[in-house]
Image: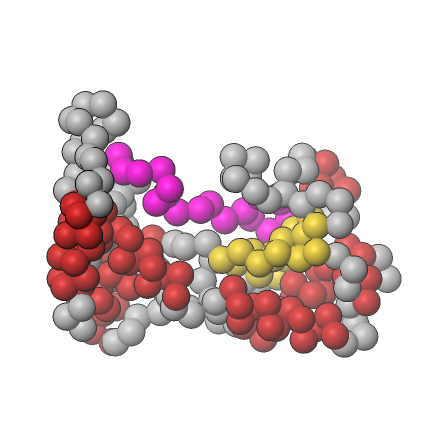
Amino acid sequence: MSRSRQAALLARHLAEVTDIEVGLYHDTGARWIAMWADGPLEKEMRTHLDTALAGHRYVDMRDRTIDCHRSTSNRAWAARAIASRREGTQGTVIVEGAAHRRSLGVGMHRPGVHGPTHTHEYYALLRHVDDLCRGTAYPERASAPEDEPLIGQGSQPVAGTAPTPACRPSQHTKWPRHYSPPSKPAPGTARPSSASSGPRRRTADIEARGTETGSWRGTV
């Protein structure tokens, strides 16, 4: 069995055990990367991956270096922000985070230089919710039934609207580049070349050969 076939089967297995879409993409040389948007934490996916590779079905992938990367969606950001607000933890964390930034003497951009000037509270909110997203398994899922209607509203970008504690800044708002949600490649393609690290193979070559990527969508 070819390595590309084993990669596709491995992606399918990971999708089935985690119940989410998983892509396994070739990077360079012996390096591959497993990517998914919503689902388990990276360390949990690593455990599933190591368990699968310890078996006999994916022997040709054992000597490959496989990195794990979970991206963050707008829905995940909204779900974590809304849960934090409902639980009453958001306000305190934002106040403390803003005070910490001020104590460090963190400067703010001047209006018109790098976009609109935001407050220390604004950046404290971004840091807090991003931390929640990174530390929560399946972050897109509502923490409580009453959160669901708000998540649906908060995850939809609206032109001309300012960010609020219930919603991540929209795609029409100028905000720090490092808070921009990573884009998820479609199954059968490499990661965008603009990413700081990841597959850099020509997408057209990969699609034409069909030999260097494997992906599978799990059941929902």
- Residue visible at 17% across and 27% down? 110
- Comparing 94 with 24, the one in front is 94
Q: Does 64 lie within the magenta span?
A: no
Reply above or below: 144 against 3: below
- Comparing 197 with 11, the one in front is 197
Tell me: 184 left or right of 187. Answer: left
- Residue visible at 74% across and 39% down? 208
Picture quadrant where residue 93 is located: bottom left
If the image is split into quadrants, where does the N terminus sit? bottom right
- Comparing 36 with 97, the one in front is 97
**Magenta residues, start to end:** 174-191
Reply above or below: 163 against 40: above
User: Percent x, y for residue 205?
Assistant: 72, 36
Q: Does 183 lie within the magenta span?
A: yes
User: Percent x, y for residue 204?
Assistant: 68, 35
- Comparing 42 with 58, the one in front is 42
User: Percent x, y for residue 142?
Assistant: 30, 70
Reply above or below: 9 against 30: below
User: Percent x, y for residue 90?
Assistant: 18, 63
Tell me: 107 left or right of 57. Answer: left
